[in-house]
Image (spheres, helix red, strand yellow):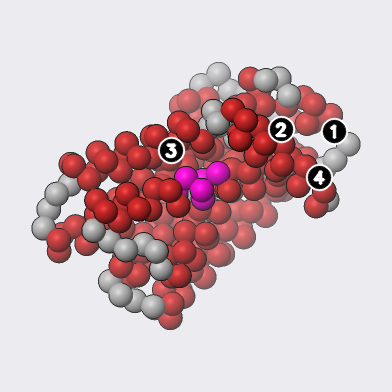
Amino acid sequence: MALVITAILKKDLLQEKRTKETFIPILIFGMLVIVIFGFAVNPSPTVLASIAPGLVWVSFVLAGFLAANRSLVIEMQEETIDLLLLAPVSRELIYYGKLLATYLLMLFVEILMLPILGILFEISLFTPEFGLILLLATFGLAVVGTLVSAISVNTNAREVMLPILFFPMIIPIIICAVASTELVLGGSGLGEIRGWLQMLLIFDIVFFVLAGLCFDFILEE
């Protein structure tokens, strides 16, 4: 099981390292979103502190949306999806491998975006508490994004279906991420955000289990 997941993960990461056809676009897009927000929103420091958590996660979600969109589209474009499906392995292992690749890509892009966010919004995000929020919330976004990418990849209206499915499903994750980030930026410690972290973990586990169970059926359809 672990060997199959690792093989898929390694294939996707090596392919991305060679082509950079997903990493470069989402990084540029994420940076543009941050810069636009930075110039569009220039209120007093007090107001900025209250809206900064939302702006941070809007930037991450929009960049992550592009990463999720590319999760299985590349396999379809290069006509390698059939080879994956013909492999004598459980379909859910394919999902787990694609999920990890998407998660690591999203996480790497978000880390590169953190300094720009800190400079433009005058906030400090390099804290252990925000690191935990980032890890859990990004995993949830990757879980949902990889799943809805598989759902929409074979549809004629993929560009419409993906956002319609993706954004409503991630609302609980975004609520928890924004609320906990606001507490962290206000000086709260791990104890104050523990409840939000637990909720993020619950959502991650539920989505992860359901996505693994549904992936085989989704690919067959």
The kind of residue tagged 4 is Val
Q: Is residue 194 visible?
A: yes
SS category of the residue bearing label 4: helix
Note whether 30 is above or below 45 in the view shown: above
Count residues near mark 1 (Cα–Cα under 10 Å), then give few for <14, some for 14-19, many for 20+: few
Q: Earlier in the sequence, mark 2 or mark 1?
A: 1
Secondary structure mostly seen in magenta is: helix
Dots 4 and 2: beta carbons under 8 Å?
no
Q: Earlier in the sequence, mark 3 or mark 1?
A: 3
In the picture as drawn, the residue positioned furthest to the bottom comes out as 191
Q: Earlier in the sequence, mark 1 or mark 4?
A: 4
The kind of residue tagged 3 is Leu
Note whether 53 is above or below 10 in the view shown: below
Which label lies toward us, 2 or 3?
Answer: 3
Residue labelled with disc 4: 4
- Quote the CA–CA distance across marks 4 and 2: 18 Å
- Quote the CA–CA distance across marks 3 and 1: 32 Å
Q: Earlier in the sequence, mark 4 or mark 3?
A: 4
Which label lies toward us, 3 or 1?
Answer: 3
Q: Earlier in the sequence, mark 2 or mark 3?
A: 3
SS category of the residue bearing label 3: helix
SS category of the residue bearing label 2: helix
- Quote the CA–CA distance across marks 2 and 1: 13 Å
Dots 2 and 1: beta carbons under 8 Å?
no
The kind of residue tagged 2 is Leu
Residue labelled with disc 1: 87
SS category of the residue bearing label 1: loop
